[in-house]
């Protein structure tokens, strides 16, 4: 697998996302994937709260954008669009002016829209698009990439029912393709001043599809989540402290 970051100029609020991509990505190969950071998607949608924002105002936006939230030592742990993430994905870094950048609206829809445009522009049939952000894993330092939207390929590789090296049938194993690709891309795109909001992935062994990807392919009901009991425990502890 080859992951190539794309160095660009600064993307400004309200700029055309597709024109920006066409300018800095002159071509894409068949069976490749274009990776786009969620920040420039949000900027293209005008999802920006401009001006000097107080911590109290920021908290209001975090709560407004979240489906559920828990106050932690460092930030708000928020649930939205099937993800647990920090501060509802709201960011203050790498913005041209002071203010807040919100998570983009409908990232799966954006990915599909871009895929259609890119297929026509570059005359390719099998093409994937991934919209990325960063996330923190429980009990691990540092951030990794996550696909908040994607299309053009199967996001899961299912091993259930297949045999392992010694002939035992696998009962639970699935590989998360979408987030794995996002992590690889975010690694080379960086988190600071690299100015590489795009990346192209080539020569990857995945199953490309022509149909629009459903946004629930990777989702798990919070009641069935492995870490679900931890969040329940946190709520119980907080309730006890209030008493």
Image: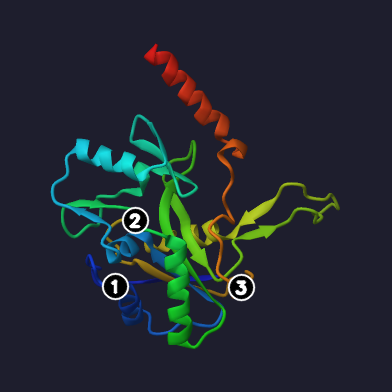
Q: Which residue is label 3 attached to?
A: 209
Quadrant position of the N terminus in the picture: bottom right
Between circles 2 and 3, the one closer to the viewer is: 3
Badge 3: few (under 14), some or many (20 or more) residues near its Cα, within 10 Å? some
- Say which quarter of the image contains residue 162: bottom right
Cβ atoms under marks 1 and 2 closer than 8 Å = no
Q: Secondary structure at mark 3?
A: loop
Q: Percent x, y for residue 237?
A: 46, 19
Badge 2: few (under 14), some or many (20 or more) residues near its Cα, within 10 Å? some
Q: Residue furthest top?
A: 243
Label 2 to label 3, Cα distance in Å? Answer: 30 Å
Label 1 to label 3, Cα distance in Å? Answer: 29 Å
Q: Secondary structure at mark 2?
A: loop
- Height in image: 161 above or below 199? above
Please state if 190 lies on the left or on the right of 112 as rendered.
left
Q: Which residue is label 1 attached to?
A: 8
- Height in image: 190 above or below 6? above
Q: Which residue is label 2 attached to?
A: 191
Q: Residue furthest left?
A: 52
Mark closer to the chain start, 1 or 2: 1
Q: Percent x, y for residue 24?
A: 33, 79
- Residue drawn 58% across the image and 60% down it: 177
- Height in image: 60 above or below 243? below
- Say which quarter of the image contains residue 44: bottom left
- Height in image: 232 above or below 209? above
Q: Residue furthest bottom?
A: 123
Q: Percent x, y for residue 13?
A: 22, 65
């Amino acid at each position: 697998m080859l992951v190539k970051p794309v160095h660009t100029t600064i993307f400004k609020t309200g700029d055309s996302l597709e024109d920006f991509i066409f300018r800095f990505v002159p071509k894409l190969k068949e069976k490749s994937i274009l990776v786009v950071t969620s920040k420039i998607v949000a900027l293209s949608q005008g999802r920006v709260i401009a001006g000097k924002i107080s911590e109290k105002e920021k908290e209001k936006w975090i709560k407004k954008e979240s489906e559920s939230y828990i106050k932690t030592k460092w930030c708000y742990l928020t649930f939205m669009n099937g993800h647990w993430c920090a501060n509802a994905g709201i960011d203050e870094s790498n913005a041209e002016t002071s203010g807040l950048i919100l998570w983009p609206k409908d990232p799966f829809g954006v990915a599909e829209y871009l895929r259609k445009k890119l297929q026509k522009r570059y005359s390719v049939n099998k093409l994937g698009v991934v919209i990325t952000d960063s996330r923190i894993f429980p009990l691990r330092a540092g951030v990794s990439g996550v696909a908040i939207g994607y299309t053009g390929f199967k996001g899961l590789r299912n091993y259930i029912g297949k045999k392992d090296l010694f002939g035992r049938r696998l009962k639970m194993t699935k590989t998360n393709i979408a987030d794995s690709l996002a992590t690889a891309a975010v690694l080379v795109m960086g988190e600071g001043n690299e100015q590489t909001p795009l990346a192209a992935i080539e020569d990857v062994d995945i199953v490309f599809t022509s149909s629009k990807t459903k946004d629930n392919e990777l989702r798990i009901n919070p009641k069935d989540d492995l870490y679900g009991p931890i969040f329940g425990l946190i709520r119980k502890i907080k309730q006890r402290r209030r008493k």
